[in-house]
Image (spheres, rainbow, N blue to C red):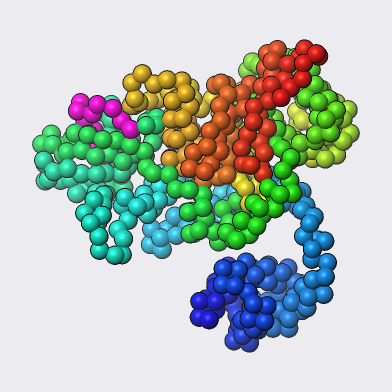
Amino acid sequence: MADRRHVIIKVFRKYGHSLGPESLEFLEDLLDRHDIADEEVEYSIEWMAQEYNKQDDAQMKVSLDVLQRVYETFQNGDNNEDEGHSQLDSDSHLFFIDAYEMPLWNWSVERSTFERAQGTLTASGSADSRVFAARNRLNVIKQCVLRNDHFSPSTLPSKDRQNLLTLKSTKQLLGRAGDRFLLFGMLTHSKEGKLCLEDQDGAVELDFSQLEQPSEGLFTEGCFALVEGDYTEDATLLVIAIGHPPCESREAARSIYGHIDFLGRGATTLLEDKQFASRVQLELPDLRFFVLSDVWLDKPDTLLGLRKMFDNCMENSFIPKVIVLCGNFTSVGIPQGNGRELRKYQDNFEALADLITSYPLLTRTTHFVLVPGPLDVTINSVLPRRPILSSFVSRLKSRVPNVHFASNPCRIKFFEQEIVIFREDLMSRMLRNLVGVKPDVKNDDLKRYLVQTILDQSHLMPVTTSIQPTLSELDHALRLYPLPTAVVLADKYERYQMTYEGCHVFNPGRFVGNTFTFSAYAPARRESEECVLDLDPEEGWS
């Protein structure tokens, strides 16, 4: 009974409500009256707390009268429960989240949890915010590392405790030449150009002369790494092993921080997540999100390819819920101040608006999301990038009701799923800034290494700001913690798809040429499938 009482108090506290003795006793009585099993208590109370929170006269201290009214309303509607339950409204659980709308949650070392930042976030930032962004990245990854089985001791005595790894700080190296250490920090270059490992207490120069090969993944300046080595008389660390930090699954992170609303669209419990996942599998097995990248609107063939894609949708009565169009929306950069090229750029979006509106069913029911690429015209060129300037897309805004002009990156929340969309030539950026990688890496390994690196680093751009400038107060918009359900790494690199630690990552390929390639993501299966569209009218697409 005490455990149930603790769950009830915890759930209502999440919504900012406190329970008096009478309200608590009423809820406990309801659980007993309906024979609610222990594993279902949290879900049941979560529903009551949500419904109570929706009442106009809901108070911070829970009113017994309002609580009883909520229960009576539920009882009156119980006869229609099965009928209502069979209707899953996908639109009411579909949200498009701009990077500039995401709340900032900082890691508190003192409280060992996330705390929501107060005040308005600015694009200008400050010296403190730049330091804070890097420190946040380190602390978020470090708390995952320390919770990993290799670092976290069991409460029961065992032989495994002898094999546990212990992290040390750079300040503990002083005066201990000849000892072996395991350090965690960021790979950076010193003023002399030497590769170092930097943590909150200092930095140490790394000597790779004895390292045969690093572990799997791509190591760039700005990555956080676990480095094992011997400290020498020359004040350097002779590296014997280097690897990325272990990745924590979405389920593990949500089990700890499930009450935190990282996206600003309402937190759900693990029980709700499981129920949503089951219902989406059963009731929405054919629902798809189409994802296209490099939609060059200045090329006539692109509009022909889009038209054929729309025609196939109509002929097969297969209407996608979402169509994500990632830039670049032009095949060449637009010189600043070139009025003629800017006018052509606007005309191309107007042609897209005319094409979409020529399909009334798609216009009414499908959500169109436009994500800018590196060559598109936006307010800023640093990450996260603002949406395409509204002056270029006024016709789309006025004629297509469900169009969303997104930032880069942006996110889609669909029931319990979180899908990250990122348009950047990430593979070439990472390869240009490598400081270590296995020799003779094959093409398939590169794709796997890139995915592994991004997810292990819990960040879409794990490089220093000198390589890729980012807005320090909005760096959390690039964070991949908790791990999303799916990540779209739209890149000019060739198409791929893979699942790592339960997170599905895919590059949809480029929607250019005579054969157009894109991806269709199936939320019911949490997987993507390749779609190829040939302009030859005799051939279909699959």
Horizontal placement of 499 versus 166: left or right?
right
Q: Tell me, yes or no, whether the highlighted magenta stretch contains residue 206.
A: yes
Q: Position of residue 522 (x, y in %)?
A: 67, 39
Q: Is there any visible trace of residue 131 in the rendered image?
A: no
In this rendering, position of residue 393 left or right of residue 472: right
At 54% from the left and 25% from the top, the residue drawn is: 425
The quadrant of the picture occupied by the C terminus is: top right
Q: Residue at x 38, y 58 (%)?
A: 109
Q: Position of residue 401 (x, y in %)?
A: 83, 40
Q: Give the quarter of the image for residue 22.
A: bottom right
Over which residues does the magenta segment extend? 203-215
Name the spot of residue 5 as percent of width and height, x first: 55, 79
Please identify the dominant SS of the magenta region.
loop
Q: Which residue is depicted at the point 62% across and 48% down?
A: 417
Q: How many marks?
A: 0
Question: Against 203, is 380 above or below?
Answer: above
- In the image, is residue 400 part of the stretch drawn in magenta? no
User: Is residue 535 something that shows in the picture?
Assistant: yes
Q: Position of residue 52 (x, y in %)?
A: 70, 72
- Vertical placement of 508 versus 271: above or below? above
